[in-house]
Image (cartoon, coloured by chain):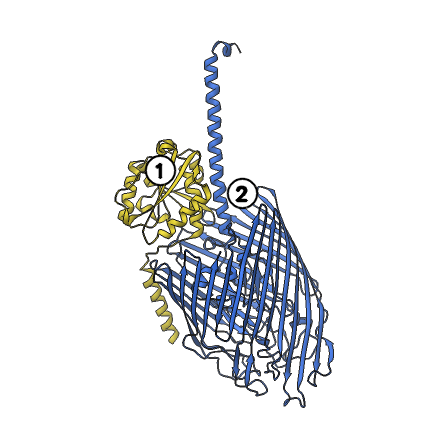
Chain colours: A yellow, B blue
Amino acid sequence: MIWSYIKTAIITTLVLFSCQIQGQNYDPLLLRAQASIFPRIILLDQKLSEKTPGKELIIDIITTNQSKHIADELKTSIREKYNDSMENNKLTVNIIEIENLNEIPVATAYIVIEIPEPSFKKIVTHASNHNRIVFSYNYTDFKNNALISLLVKEKTYIYLNKPAIKLYNIKFLPVFYKIIKIIE
Amino acid sequence: MTYITKKPHLFLLILAFLTLSRASLANDSDMLQLLEEDMQEYSRIATQTRQNVDYMPYIISAWNSDDLIHLGISTLRDALSLVPGIDLSIGTVGITTPIFRGSNPFAMGQSKLVIDGVVVNDKMTGSYGQFLDMPVSLIQRIEIVRGPGSLLSYVNGYAGSIHVITKANRDDGLAVNNEAFVELGSKQYRTGGFVLSHQENDLSVSSDLFYKTHEQSSPVSADRYGTSGDAEQWLDNYSLGINADYNNFSIKSRLSKREAGASYGQSFSLSEDDSDFVSIENNFIELGYSYDISKNIKLELSLGYIELIRQLQNKVIPDAAMPPDGRYFLVNIAEETFHERAELQITSINSHQINLGIHSYQSDMANRDARFSTDSMQTFTDFEIINDTARNMYSLYIDDLIDITEKTSIQLGAKYDHYSDVDNQLSPRLALVHRYDNENIYKFMYTHSYREPSWREQYLTMPAFFSSTADIKPEIVDAYEFGYIRKINLQDHIKMNAYYLKNKDQIHAQNPTHTFKNSGNNNLYGYEIEYKNEFSNSDQFYFTYSYVHGKNVADVLASSSSNLVNAYYIHNFNNAISISTIAKFIDEKSRIATDMRSNVDSYTLIDLTINYQHRPGDVNFNLSVKNLFDEDYYLPSPETTYPDDYKQVGRSILFGLKKKF
C-alpha cells in the first residue's frame, strides 16, 4: 500500500520537475564536433572573401557569464584544431559575454551558446543584416532563427534552418546542400 | 586545329575557364570531403564512447569518472550501486557480487566484467569481485548493460555486463592525461595511484597503478556454529596496467592482486585464526593488430592470455565443533586462459554496419592443489580440489546494424558457441530503435543468451558446503525489453524501460542437498525509470526507480529487492565548490521458501560530499561522509549460515585529492 503512495509521489515529482526545464548544459563531444565542423562550414560561404577583410576570419562566440566556461572550451578546441589559420585566412576567435555587450561587432560568423531569447534575436538581426552566419550550440535555438546547428545522434547531422535561410541571404557552395539536413 | 590557330585568345580563355572550374570543383570536393570526414569521425567517437546511445538500439547506463568523483564515488563497487536495477550481495569469503534485476542471486557469474575489452571473470567461480575496489580515479567511463547481450559482439552477458574503459586506454580521441590521486579514510583506508602517458611519433605508452589498503571488519552476532566476533575484511590491493600502441599494433596488460581477510569464511563460519586470508591474482596481456583493408572494411586481430591464481587459508571449522584443533582448509589454484579473436568491421554496404568475427578460448587449471589440516597446520591431507576442467570454446558471430530509414534502425545478430564440455549455444538478437524525433526515442529488443556453468558449479570434487553436478546445463534467458527515452534537452532526459525475462534451467544450490544443479524455470518482469535534470548551472538532480517482480529461485523472489531507489542532488555554490548528496533506498528482501527467517529489512543510505575544484591548478579535493546517519543494514546470507545476515559497515569518512599534470 505504502508503495502505491510512493510511486504516485515519484510520478508527481517527475511531472513537476519536467515543467521547470531551463537547462544550460554542456556536452563535451558535441562541442568538439562543433569546433571542428562550424569553421569548415564558414568556408563554404560563396561570398566569404567579402566577409574576411584583411584576410582575417573572425568567429565571435557569444554567451552568458554563466556559460563562459563552455565558450572557453569551444575556443580552445577551435584553436587546437585550426592553429589560428584557415584557408589562407588568419583565424581569430573572440568570446563575448552578452552582459558586457554594448554594440555587436561585425565578425565573419557567430556561434551563440545559451543566451536569453531577446539577446539571441538581436544577434540574429545584426548578423542577418550583414549576411553573416549564426550557428547555435543548441539546435532548439532554431526557434530564435539561428541558421545552422549540429547534433550528434546515431550519426552527425548538420541542421540548416529553412525558415531562416531567406533572412540571412547567404549562398553556400552547392556541395554543402548535399550533406545537410534542412529543418522545415 | 584551324579554329584554334585562328582564335588563340578565345582558346586560352576557354582553357583557363575549364582549368579554374576544375580547380574550383576539386577545391569544393576537398572541402566537402573534409567536412564529411569530420562528421564521420564524430559519429564514430560518439558510437564508440556510447555518447549517442540514446539513439542506438541498446539500453545502457554510462558514467564518466569526473561525474562520479564529483559525487564522492570512490570505487567501481560504489558506482554500480547507483545504477538502476543493480543490487549488491555477498558470496563466500566476503566477495561482492552485483545482482542485476533480481536475477538468480545464488548463481556464479551471471554478469560479466569487461576491462578495456578483456573479460576478467574467472572460470572457477565466474567472479570478478577482485576488481570492484578499482578506484574510479583510474576509470574513464563505466558502461552497464542491464539484461543479456553485451556491447561487444563476442561477449555474452546473461543478467548484465559491465564495461570499464580505463583512462590509460581512453577511446574518445583525446590524449591520455597524467594524473595522480590519494584517498584517506576511516578504518585506515588509504589509496594512491596515477595515470601516466608518453607519446613519441607513432609510439604511445600509457600506464596506471593503484594501491589500496584498509583494516575494515564487520561485527557478527553468530555464524553457523553460533560463534560471534568480527569478520576480518582487511585489504591489500594493487593493480598495474601497461599499454602501448605503435602504428597498427597494440598491447594491453594488467597485473592485479587482491589479498584480504577471510571475511565470512569459505564455509560460512568465522575464523579463529587472524592470519587467515584469501588472495586473488589476476594478470592478463592482450596483443592487438588492426588493419584498414579498405576505407570501409577494417580487420581486428587479438591474442591474449589471462592467468588467475587463488590462494586461501581459512580455519573453516572451529575447535569446539571439531575437537581438538578444528579444521583448516587451504587452496592454491591457478587457471589459465588463452583467447584469440578475428573481426571484420564492414561499412561498405550502404546503410549497414556489419561486425563479423570468430572468437575462441582455451581454459584449464594449471594448479588445483588443496589441503586440509586438523592439527593446526602441522600435517596436511593433500588433494585436488577440482577435475576435468579443460574448457575450449569456439565462437562465430555476426551482427548488422541496418538503418532502414533515417529514423529507424534495426540490429540483427547471432552468435554460435561450441563448447568442449557443455552444450553448444546459438544466441540470436533483434533490436529496433525508432527515433520519432530528436526528443522521443522508442526501442524494442529481443535477446536470447545463456551462461555456461562455472567450474565451481560443475566440477568440484571435494566435500564442501555446496557441491557440484558434472552434467549441469547452461542457464538460458530470453529477454524482451521495451524502452522509451524523452530527451528534455541536450543533456537531460527521462528514460523508461520495461522488461520480461524468461529464465530456464536456473543453477543454484538452494536445495536440501546443497548441490548446484539446474533447478527449473523462473520468469522476472519489471521496469526502470531514470530521470536527470539540471535546473540551472547550480543544481543537478538525478533519480532512478527500479521495480522487479516474479521468481528467481524456487517460486520466490529471494535475496533480491523488488524496489530500488537511487537519487542524487548536486548544488554548485560557484565554479569551484559544490555539495552533493546521494540517497539509496533498498526495499526488504524475501527468503527462499524453506528459510524461516523474517525478510531482510529495507534500508536507506545517505552520503554527503563536498567538492572543491581548483581549475587553474587542475586539483580536486573531496570530502565525503558515507552512510551519514550510520544506518544499520544487512545483506542476506544463505539459509543455515549466518542467522542474522551480513551486517554492513556504518558511517565512514573519505578524503580524496586528485591532481592532473
Mark 1 falls on what kind of element?
loop
> Could you tell me which chain the residue with mark 2 belongs to?
B
Closer to the camera, B661 or B128? B661
Instruction: Give the residue number, with chain letter if any, for mark 2.
Output: B350
Q: Residues within 10 Å of mark 2 (few under 14, many from 20)?
A: few
Can you give x and y, in whole percent of width and height, for residue B112 in the image?
Answer: 57, 64
Disc number for residue B351: none
Closer to the camera, A63 or B551? A63
Q: Nearer the viewer, mark 2 or mark 1?
A: 1
Q: Is residue B132 above or below residue B441?
A: below
The residue sitting at 37% across, 68% down in the picture is A10
The residue sitting at 37% across, 32% down in the picture is A54
- Is residue A33 visible in this depiction of the protein? yes
Instruction: Give the residue number, with chain letter if any, for mark 1.
Output: A108
> Could you tell me which chain the residue with mark 1 belongs to?
A
Residue B328 placement: quadrant: bottom right
